[in-house]
Amino acid sequence: MTAVSNHHVTKSIRPNILEMAGYAPGEQPQAGKFIKLNTNENPYPPSPRVVQAIREAAESSLIRYPDATATCFRQRAAEVLGVDPDWILCGNGSDDILTILTRAFVGEGELLRLPYPSYVLYKTLGNLQGARSEEVPFQNDWTLPDTFAAPSEGLKLAFLPNPNSPSGTVINHDDLRRLAAQMPCPLLIDEAYVDFADADCLALVREFEHVMVSRTLSKSYALAGLRFGFLVAQPTLIQQLVKVKDSYNCDALAIAGATAAIDDQEWLRENRQKVIATRQRLHQALEQLGFSVIPSQANFLWCTHPAVPLEPVYQQLKSNRILVRYMKYPQWSDGIRISVGTDDQIDALLALLPTLM
């Protein structure tokens, strides 16, 4: 029997997969010590209750399949958020939630609408479906034009991060409600960073059947390594989306840790205060160095500079073992996104930056 060559096997992959670039995560160095301010992780350890819950689950739960719908998490999260448990769908990080939604709503050749610039994974998920992506640019003040809610042939789903990345900006509630009311398709409001913001959009989920909100425990709960996120939507939608998710998409340790995390709201309040205080201090210091800094409602700052090229600054920071995220967008100025670290980490960054300017 003649073996099929690798060349022929590759040609069997769907054309849209061959053509796409694939999502490129931020740098995650596996060796050496870095100050990591590039992927918006929380710089502080999670609630001690999380570690204890994972330890207990490891001793008792690993021989069985996990609860397929993460019931214990949904029950506790429902109490915290003021909804019923059947309004919540859990996922392997909020990226899993985004994947479920794209698979459920957007077919091959259909249209996914996104703001620009925003989270680059959105477009990748559309590519995986063989779908078309329409990017609607933010206006200069980081608001969205009315065209974001305009009808378009084949439009099946819109993603809207709020707060946005890389800008850290939010669409105010009145404008967002107006967009939601006009949207001709389901709207997912991605609230990955909302615990660092002044307000959330859960009221819109209660008001509009086609509006959904996604959350993650990676940022505000310091659980990026655990991979746990969830969706809040009306039960008629949740019932359909459950069909699309992987059978056991959240493992037993993640469910136990996530439940313990969302149960410790006092830890969240204290952590939020620390991160916001450091964010404010970093903002002021960067402006004193000549950066243009957008006021942020997330756990990072987006910085541009009117005179200094920023890619060399990023490279020199990296050579000094400080990682930030350099990002360059067509039709927008390039910039660096700096995650809010501990005060010691930010002090190290601010001590080095003036020597690079």
Image (cartoon, helix red, strand yellow):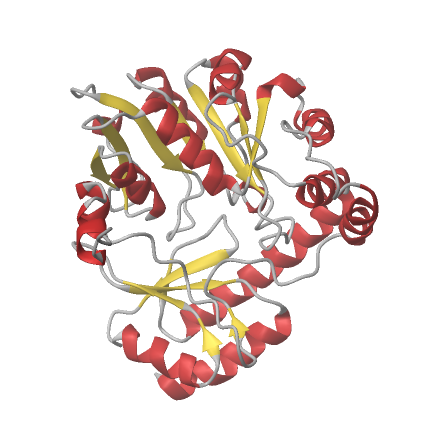
Q: Position of residue 69 (x, y in %)?
A: 63, 27
Q: Identify the image quadrant of residue 116.
A: top left
Q: Outermost residue toward the bottom?
A: 355
> Quick check: 279 above or below 242?
below
Q: Nearer the viewer, residue 251 or 261?
A: 251
Which residue appears at 31% of the width and 64% of the height? 335
Q: Nearer the viewer, residue 40 or 28?
A: 28
Q: Position of residue 241 (x, y in %)?
A: 47, 22
**In-image side of 182 versus 90 (left or right):** left
Q: Which quadrant does the C terminus fall into?
A: bottom left
> Quick check: 317 above or below 190?
below
Q: Position of residue 351 (x, y in %)?
A: 51, 83
> Quick check: 11 above or below 186?
below
Q: Nearer the viewer, residue 19 or 125?
A: 19
Q: Is residue 142 visible?
A: no
Which residue appears at 16% of the width and 19% of the height? 153
Q: Is residue 47 visible?
A: yes
Which residue appears at 68% of the width and 25% of the height? 78
Number of dots carrying numbers: 0
Q: Position of residue 53 (x, y in %)?
A: 80, 46
Q: Outermost residue toward the front?
A: 1
Which residue appears at 68% of the width and 35% of the height? 65
